[in-house]
Amino acid sequence: MSDVTVWQQPTVVVVTGLPGTGKSTLAEGIAKAARAPAFSVDWLLGAIAPSGVLSGAARPVVRGVYEGLLSSLLTRQLMLGQSAVLDTIASESPALTREESS
């Protein structure tokens, strides 16, 4: 991955796949090579877990929380003219839908 050229304009790379297929490893490698942050659902939810605010929450609530966080992080990166790598399920990400339609 050391041959990756840093993008000339803000770029969003979405890495998606089934659990255990290596998508997080791939996303982190791309982010490191491109010098862009990697935003992962696992890391975001892991940071929230100790607070207990999502304990017992229904799956749609949890999904809404992580989609909102990813959307905010991605929006801010693009506002700053910076790239990002998302490690998530693309079909469930409102951030991608909103940005693609802009």
Image (tube, rainbow, N blue to C red):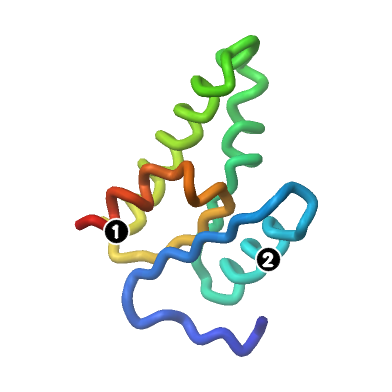
| Residue displayed at 47% across by 42% down | 92
Q: Is residue 85 above or below residue 76?
A: below
Front-most of residues 76 and 27: 27
Q: Secondary structure at mark 2?
A: helix
Q: Secondary structure at mark 1?
A: helix
Name the image quarter holding residue 49: top right
Q: Is residue 12 above or below residue 44?
A: below
What x and y, as percent, mark residue 91?
48, 48
Side of 17 where 84 appears, left or right: left
User: Which of the image's four quarters has the N terminus?
Assistant: bottom right
Side of 22 where 42 appears, left or right: left
Furthest residue in direction front, as rendered: 91
Q: Is residue 7 above or below residue 71?
A: below
Q: Which residue is mark 2?
A: 26
| Residue displayed at 47% across by 81% down | 6
Rate crowding at label 2 as few (under 14), some (14 to 19) or many (20 or more) other CA atoms within 10 Å. Answer: some
User: Which of the image's four quarters has the C terminus?
Assistant: bottom left
Furthest residue in direction top, as rendered: 56
What x and y, as percent, mark residue 26?
68, 66
Front-most of residues 70 and 59: 59
Q: Which residue is mark 1?
A: 100
The amino acid on which the numbered mark 2 sits, given as a three-letter code, is Leu
Of the two numbered discs 1 and 2 in the rendering, the one whose residue sits closer to the viewer: 1
Name the image quarter holding residue 62: top right
Side of 79 where 21 appears, left or right: right
The amino acid on which the numbered mark 1 sits, given as a three-letter code, is Glu
